[in-house]
Image (spheres, coloured by chain):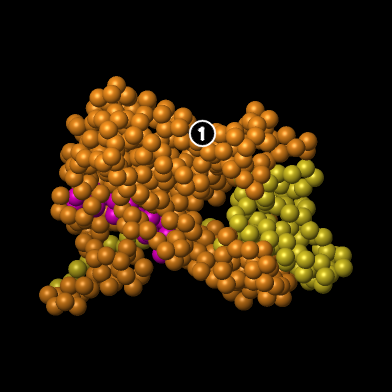
Amino acid sequence: MQVQIMSPAANRVDFTVPPAPRLSSLEGKTIGLYNNMTGGADVAVDRIAEHLSRRYAHIKFERYGGERRSGRPVLSRGVHIDDAEAARIAGEVDAVIGATAH
Amino acid sequence: MVAVEKAGLPAVGIVARSFVRAWQACVEGWGQPSTAFVTIPHATTGQQTDFICKMVDAQVDAVVRCLTTLPASAGTSGGAQGSSTATEIFTVEMDATPTGLDAVNRFLAERDWSDGLPVIPPTPEAVEQMLKGTRRAPQDVLMVMEPGFGLATVEKIAINAVMAGCRPEQFPILLAAIDCLAQPEMNHRDMQVSGHTEAPLILVNGPIAKKAGLNVGTTAMGPGAINSANTAIGRALRLCLINIGYCKAGAGDPNFVGLPTKFGMCLAENEEVSPWQPYHVDRGFRRADSAVSVVVVTGPTTIIDSGSRTPDDTLNNIASMMFYRHAGAGSWIRGWQSAQVGHTNRRVTFPGPYHPVILSPSRAVLMAEAGMSKQDAQAWLHQHCRTSLQAAVGTRGMPTDANGAWLTHPELQALAQDPAATIPALESPEQYLLFVTGGSTHYAHFFYGTYGMATRPVEDV
């Protein structure tokens, strides 16, 4: 016996983002460190920053996420980075390293 | 992180091994499946600093590589389907042998289109019959369901409803539940992709409950033939979350161990027996209307209330559930949660969590006989369920301005040094969602709510 069945899987919004060009080196660059305020994510990105600081004499960092504090770049729209936030970050750093505790 | 790449910056994520499939599902949904990541053995949450550092130390070279070299798979398609609305139809061979009887289930499971239980084959005839349960057009889109950004058309929902064993008269309840999830304040994205265990609880009010055959008595959340409507509707929503939202176990759904209630939960209020006004009337509907509420919860925990003789006894018993300090206790002092709306830059703030308390009619009657309304009971819980202000602030601290002033609830800052200062665990009394159903005896269920809640009308077909 043949049974015909309809696919339960939905069509998806067609949405494609090309990858960004990569850096030739991290030397002299400013790197964004993003954590979404979940446990230990800040520790993870800060540890990476420590290592990179030892490797690259002129590397700099800006931090995104965590609590709002004076003099620090912050995320104005909660813990997630949306397009508007990403555009602002793109004016401040050359690359982003992120951790979400997961 | 895909938004960062979209803005033209190379990005790399640090991802725990058990969340790699979740990462891949999310970045695929956001349109760049090759978004770079490095892997660490365990999630960082709940770990000591030294242990996190040790895990991360091994990945420094990989991080540098990801920022300086394009991944080999860069530019590959994420599998997003085109704009065609035609639903694929497959032919499956079945026969009366054990293997033959299971052919449709195997076909669906091989494509990850299943909740793991046997289903009713979604034949075109069965789907057509299901669509008679609504006046909505088959290609109406109720929402874009995340994390896969799937188009929740009425037809796709009907297909999943057939698979779950729903009947056409139950279909409007399922559609209303998805209308609820479509509300931005539900924050259904975080419900879907969170690592902790949570699931949507469907609450039904009004005449539709009887029409749909929902059990409002003993074992209403349990297995059994008398609960077939409750079970099928709850299950149908889960199948939609899997097949329309692409919330696949271990991928889009990264719950650390899962939750039996994720197979589906649907309850109707026992309005005939409850001494209080129905929940949908609390939400602004008329008693004669039908409405569905969806709230996102973990749990439940059973409250055994056999020793209680007074409303205070019962409410004290319920209040004891709030001792678990991660149940959102006091988190409102940092302001409302917010949810991003789809791919847009818009965010919606919403109050929460809502903690459903499923009361046996017996417990509601105990309070009502003492002259207590539902609102009185909610006010009691709001007043008595408290947490210390210092515990609410915790090690995370408060968001402050440049002068150290609290940005949210500055009126409480003067009490911050007082170890005896307390605040209500939840911001508003109505966040204790009292819902009366089940057999009339000395029990209640307490669910910890997590994200948002919404109520929508049910179509009268």
From what the image shows, is residue B78 above or below residue A90?
below
Residue A8: x, y in percent? Answer: 32, 60
Please indicate, yes or no, whether residue A12 appears anywhere in the rendered image.
no
Residue at the location (78% across, 36% down)?
Answer: B403
Residue at the location (34% across, 34% down)?
Answer: B313
Q: How many marks?
A: 1
Q: Residue furthest left?
A: B96
The orange chain is B
Q: Which part of the image, by quadrant, shows the N terminus of chain B?
A: bottom right
Q: Is residue B3 rendered to the left or right of residue B268? A: right
Q: Which residues are magenta?
A: B227-249
Magenta run includes residue A13: no
> In the rendered image, which residue does mark 1 sit on?
B424
Q: Residue furthest right?
A: A57
Residue B366: x, y in percent? Answer: 26, 30
Residue at the location (31% across, 53% down)?
Answer: B264
Quarter occupied by residue B415: top right
Q: Chain of mark 1?
A: B
Label 1 amino acid? Pro
Q: Is residue B107 rendered to the left or right of residue A89? A: left
Please indicate, yes or no, whether residue B72 appears anywhere in the rendered image.
yes
Q: Residue furthest top?
A: B371
Quarter occupied by residue B34: bottom right
The shade of chain A is yellow
